[in-house]
Image (cartoon, helix red, strand yellow):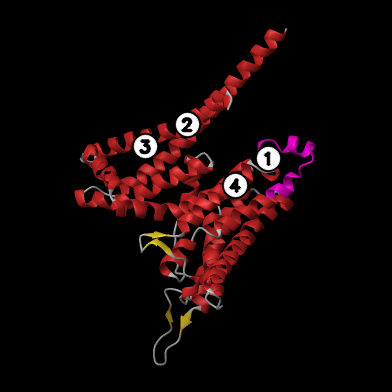
């Protein structure tokens, strides 16, 4: 590893650490203003780090965040902002619950079948935004946001239309969830009711993400197209094809975000299942700088904060301070990343100018 690459890696890591420190500092000020003791709050929050149940819960919460962040990061590497992971996850959840619940297969095949359905549905939904980008140059931020609203509305309409139960002599009632999946479609736990096996799947997805983006020709073309589509086109890469393929891959990964909740917990779909996991993945990807290792540790941090936040209420401290903290972390990351990028650009310009001057 050369010196320049090592320096950039250290600066990148430091920017995320600084963002966390800034968030802790601002939250401490907020706690003081509201009459709470920040030292007590943070000691209560982080004091739970050594408890086995908290750590298991942290890994369980981190599982969908890793998958969601990987889906977002694939788009970011192509300079695409797939804000539609939430909608892609939602339609994948419903289709998997309905189709997966309608078939009977042996356990391994049934689980694999559900994964295929989820990935296909997510890819199709994301592919709409990719097609609009390629064929009509529609900004993917706008299209994916609109597709989120459409997905939520379609799911709500489907429940209202197809999942009603008529009982003789009673008014029509609305089922709170779909038919339960057969036990052959249940994903097993690593630790009973505390840590689901989907955690291993999330790790595998991050490893495959790293291999795809950094160790394959496709990944090089993906990063090249995202960095400079004109230069990539000059070398024979079709940027439009890369846009569509990256959106399909992103959507396929997004389809798996809610599978821990569906196949490992509730075993049926309901409207609030895995809520906000798609949006939370954006924050995790930003904090992790779209790198699998960064995503892994960022997801663990967010998972821990979510799992340990309930303990704050025991000390009469609102657990919403954790939500404020995560929001500040994301905002700080965006600001610091932009500052670091500008600093790096100036450094490269100075080095290039020095080389030209030395040559002359």
- For residue 93, above or below residue 326: below
- Residue at image position (50%, 47%) is 282
Q: Which of disc 2 and disc 1 is earlier in sequence? A: 1
Say what secondary structure mark 2 lies in. Answer: helix
Give the residue at mark 2. 336
Q: Which residues are magenta?
A: 222-243
Residue 139 inside the magenta-drawn segment:
no
Residue 223 inside the magenta-drawn segment:
yes
Q: Which of disc 3 and disc 4 is earlier in sequence? A: 3
**Disc ID at residue 142:** none
Say what secondary structure mark 4 lies in. Answer: helix
- Residue at image position (64%, 42%) is 215
Position of the N terminus, as image quadrant, is top right
Q: Which of disc 4 and disc 2 is earlier in sequence? A: 4
The reply, left or right, for residue 231 in relation to residue 186 is right
Q: Residues within 10 Å of mark 2 (few under 14, many from 20)?
A: some
Position of the C terminus, as image quadrant, is top right
Report whether residue 81 is seen.
no
Of the two numbered discs 2 and 4 in the rendering, the one whose residue sits closer to the viewer: 4
Give the residue at mark 4. 74
Give the residue at mark 1. 220
Give the residue at mark 3. 23
**Spatial separation of the CA atoms under disc 1 and disc 3:** 35 Å
Q: Are marks 1 and 4 in contact (CB under 8 Å)?
A: no
């Amino acid at each position: 590893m050369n010196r320049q690459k090592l320096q950039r890696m250290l600066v990148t890591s430091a920017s995320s650490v600084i963002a966390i420190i800034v968030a802790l500092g601002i939250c401490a000020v907020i706690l003081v203003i509201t009459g709470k003791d920040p030292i007590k709050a943070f000691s209560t929050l982080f004091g739970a780090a050594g408890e086995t149940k908290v750590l298991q819960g942290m890994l369980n919460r981190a599982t969908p965040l890793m998958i969601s962040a990987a889906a977002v990061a694939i788009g970011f590497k192509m300079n695409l902002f797939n804000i539609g992971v939430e909608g892609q996850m939602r339609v994948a959840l419903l289709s998997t619950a309905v189709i997966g619940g309608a078939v009977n297969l042996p356990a391994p095949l049934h689980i694999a079948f559900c994964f295929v359905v989820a990935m296909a549905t997510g890819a199709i939904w994301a592919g709409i935004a990719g097609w609009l980008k390629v064929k009509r140059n529609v900004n993917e931020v706008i299209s994916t946001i609109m597709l989120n609203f459409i997905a939520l509305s379609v799911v709500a309409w489907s429940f209202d239309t197809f999942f009603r139960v008529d009982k003789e002599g009673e008014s029509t009632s609305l089922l709170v969830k779909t038919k339960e999946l057969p036990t052959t479609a249940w994903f097993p736990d690593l630790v009973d009711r505390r840590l689901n096996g989907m955690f291993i799947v999330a790790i595998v997805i991050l490893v495959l993400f790293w291999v795809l983006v950094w160790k394959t020709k496709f990944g090089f073309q993906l990063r090249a197209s995202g960095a400079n589509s004109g230069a990539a086109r000059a070398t024979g890469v079709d940027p439009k094809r890369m846009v569509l393929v990256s959106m399909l891959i992103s959507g396929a990964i997004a389809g798996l975000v809610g599978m821990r909740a569906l196949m490992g917990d509730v075993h049926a779909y309901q409207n609030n299942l895995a809520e906000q996991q798609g949006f939370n993945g954006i924050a995790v990807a930003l904090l992790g700088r779209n790198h699998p290792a960064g995503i892994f540790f960022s997801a663990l941090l967010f998972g821990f904060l979510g799992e340990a936040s309930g303990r704050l209420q025991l000390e009469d401290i609102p657990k919403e301070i954790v939500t404020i903290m995560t929001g500040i972390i994301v905002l700080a990351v965006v600001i610091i990343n932009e500052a670091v990028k500008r600093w790096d650009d100036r450094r490269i310009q100075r080095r290039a100018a020095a080389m030209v001057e030395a040559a002359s």
